[in-house]
Amino acid sequence: MRIVKTELRTIQLPLVRPFRTSFGTQTSREVLMISIINENGVRGWAECVAMSEPLYSPEYTDGCRDLIKKFLLPKLHSHGDFLAEEVAEILKPFLGGQMAKAALETAILDAQLREQGTSLATFLGATKDKVECGVSVGIARSIEELVEEVGSYVEAGYRRIKLKIEPGWDIEPVAKIRSIYPTIPLQVDANQAYSRSDGAHLANLDPFNLLLIEQPLDEHDILGHAILATQVKTPICLDESIISLQSAHDALALKATTVINIKPGRVGGYFESVKIHNLCMQEKIPVWCGGMLETGIGRAANLALAALPGFTLPGDTSASARYFKRDITQPFVMENGYLTVPTAPGIGIDPDIEFLESITTAYEEI
Ligand code: OSB
Ligand code: MG
């Protein structure tokens, strides 16, 4: 295909409650939306998962917009005709920028699949029509507030709880939630907040039968995670460190991780995500689909991926209501702890343009 028009739009969508992690507090989701139109007038949609500040990853919303405008789009335009399958290779000379590249590739893939009449789930090799939902719970102001928040999610039907932790907010909240829910699948996410000397401390989480501890150490500290894995019984799961098939392969070879969180934006797109999924299936490593507080546009595509057979653990693919009072698409509603995988062509869902316009803070056409 060829891209005849690209629309870049930044939106600002308030969260239903502040989301605090070890790297900061989000009260609103700033999202870069991409829409491309191909030579046959078919439109494709994607959202870029980068956050407004480079706190989780070096990428951020305005930086992604700049990268797309200045380098990625001109490269594709000068290439001429291409398939979504070729985008990553064409953009490879530009280093990094996985989130920006993933968004552009996904918008192109969406248009390509809409034109073919194929759903993203079918195209990627999905084997499920619904996906088990977990929920990621931010650091609370008090144990009482945490108990209340977790209680509301359990009541809503979530099948797995993930607690955000950091030094000073780890053993006590985990012990409390475990005492209230002795059997619920429970895991924690530190977003790199610990250091190599914290092995003995983190081993205090072992009695709570956690599914995993996500990204305890610095994203570059693969060896540190391998050492930590010998000091704690809880399985280690890498998030931030996994930015490509290569990094997944290396982390597994070094025994730094025994579970992997796949986030398409972080690894450069859905094709790379499927490659990591396939590697993990071959190596019998469980994977699950992470989230970046996506709107319905990103969520739809993540559900298609999470429907692949290797996604054996519930992901952070929560219902729209967990994030936003009003989503930019029809809301994703959880039923009995599951979200339904979209079946319409492409990502299978469209944004409400009027609502999108009402929350737009910057718009340009290229
Ligand atoms: O580390 O998984 C993370 C949200 C933003 C950035 C990083 C992370 C998260 C979450 C929430 O944990 C996942 C979600 O519900 O979308
Ligand atoms: Mg994480």
Image: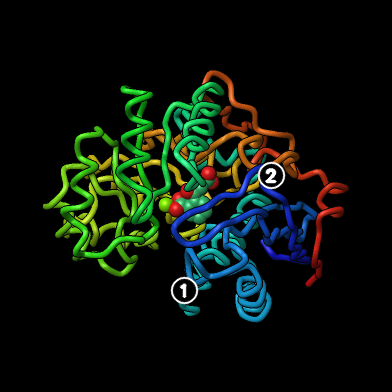
Q: Count all numbered tags in the image, as a single digit.
A: 2
Q: Where residue 191 sits in the image (x, y, percent)?
A: 39, 57
Mark 1 and mark 2 in contact (Cβ < 8 Å)?
no
92 and 177: which is toward the camera: 177
The residue at 50%/67% (across/down) is: 55
131 and 53: which is toward the camera: 53
Q: Which residue is mark 2?
A: 114
Amino acid under label 1? Gly
Q: Which residue is mark 1?
A: 96
Q: Earlier in the sequence, mark 2 or mark 1?
A: 1
What SS does tag 2 mark?
helix
Applied colour scheme? rainbow
Seen as rendered, the residue at the extreme left is: 230
| Residue 83 visible in the shown view | no
The residue at 67%/54% (across/down) is: 28
Q: Tell whether 56 sits left or right of 111.
A: left
Q: Where residue 267 sits in the image (x, y, percent)?
A: 44, 59
Q: Where residue 223 sits in the image (x, y, percent)?
A: 19, 65
Give above or below for 121 relative to 363: above
Amino acid under label 2? Arg
Quarter that holds the N terminus: bottom right
| Residue 232 visible in the shown view | yes
Give above or below for 101 relative to 162: below
Disc 2 to disc 1, C-alpha distance = 28 Å
The residue at 61%/59% (across/down) is: 48
Q: Callout 1: few (<14), some (14-19), or many (20+) C-alpha neighbours within 10 Å?
A: some
What SS does tag 1 mark?
loop
